[in-house]
Amino acid sequence: MWVSTIALYFYLHSILQAEVEEELRSTEARIETSLSKNGAIYQLHPVVEVAQVPEMGVEMLKDTLIYDPSQDELEEFRELSTYSAINGKNYKITVRALVVESRDILIAIVLSYLVMILVVFVFLFYLNRSGNQRLWRPFFKNLEQMKKFSLTSEKPISLVDSDILEFSELNTEISTLTDKVRSDYKNLKQYTEDVSHEMQTPLAIIQAKIENVINGDILDDRQFEHLTSILKDIQRLTQMTKRLTLLTKIENNQFPNVEKLDITRQMEETVQNFNDVSAISIKLENHHQIWVEMDPYLAAIVCNNLVSNAIKHACDKKDIIVKAHMDKISVANCGTSSLRHPESLYNRFYRESETVKSTGLGLAIVKRICDFYGFKISYNFEHGMHNFSIDFA
């Protein structure tokens, strides 16, 4: 815009200057005609000056400043000085034209051009903006619907129709895709549940039969050891199946029930239950109430998994310390050194040591539950203690 304005200014300036020069030459020609006809010297200071001179000079065109008594100020004039021989006499004819007015006209035209461009720009801006808003409104509404899309919901996605062919095709593809994804999710969910359910029955039967063999028949030590090992593996497999199913349900947001509960009280009940069956003493310190909003079943899972993990990895039968202070619960068990790969603690099936037989899913489940509710779980090792903490704030 500024380039075009500057170009317009110089273009109009050259046109006005040419018009002024044309006017000066026209006036000079009329004066020469008047002199040739009647010989009278015409004067109109400061616009026209005619003087008889002894010899001819060189034509000159220039700008000059001349005092104007009527305005009591210096005015800028365009001056043309020519020499003519008329009726045997030499004349110097000087004609002038006021250029101030032409410059004012030039500035007025340029300003009008700028205002017009600005008005057109503002008009087109708001017109284009409103047009774009109307044009893209169906797209953004459909985008909001996609953000709200849930695999677990039976309600079909509601898309806004559009007259634009591309948006219409996009809506069709989105509807097809979401229906396919929901269908695949239902099939996978049904398959997972069926497999989990069907595995429980044969595992329970195998476990019962092995227990009957162990308890009822006369076995040598080697047979007893093998059957006991098989029984433990079956129990681990049963537990792993249940935990994998639980992880799937957590990741698929199948725990919509949220209650306000005292997590410290839940941890107290967990500690009491484990103290009844564990050879390791578990102490609850700094018994402060911590209120959280979550599913009660998942709250119990978090407490059970933290304490169970501490028991499995405790050394020398030393006490496990559970603290509930401010908005944080921590569970600490003794250890000889810090974990080698703490960043992998919450990965599925990760075990720091193969000497402890576990599914490797306990902490992974705790981490998924914390992520689900926005809690923060952390690990540190100090003073010979492995410490897992959950910040509920």
Image: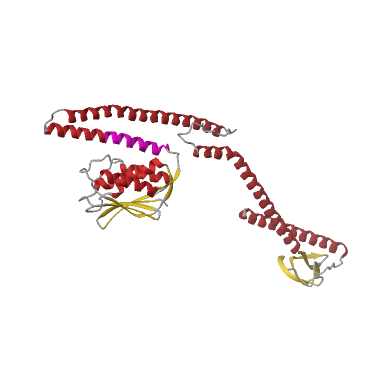
Residue drawn at 21 percent across, 50 percent down: 317
Expressed as whole percent of the image width and height from the top left, the position of residue 20 reads: 75, 59
Q: Which corner quadrant of the image does residue 27 belong to?
A: bottom right
Q: Is residue 271 magenta?
A: no
Main SS, magenta residues: helix
Expressed as whole percent of the image width and height from the top left, the position of residue 253 reads: 43, 38
Find the residue positioned furthest to the right.
38
Residue drawn at 43 percent across, 48 percent down: 292
Looking at the rendering, the stretch of residues picked out in magenta corresponds to: 236-254
Q: Which corner quadrant of the image does residue 210 belong to?
A: top left
Q: Which corner quadrant of the image does residue 207 belong to?
A: top left
Residue drawn at 49 percent across, 36 percent down: 149
Let me know if residue 372 appears in the view: yes
Residue drawn at 29 percent across, 36 percent down: 239
Q: Nearer the viewer, residue 43 or 241?
A: 241
Expressed as whole percent of the image width and height from the top left, the position of residue 28 reads: 79, 62
Q: How is the image coloured?
A: secondary structure
In the rendered image, the vertical position of residue 231 relative to residue 88, given as above or below:
above
Q: Is residue 187 left or right of residue 315?
A: right
Expressed as whole percent of the image width and height from the top left, the position of residue 295 reads: 42, 42
In the rendered image, the vertical position of residue 238 relative to residue 30, given as above or below:
above
Q: Is residue 145 left or right of residue 125?
A: left
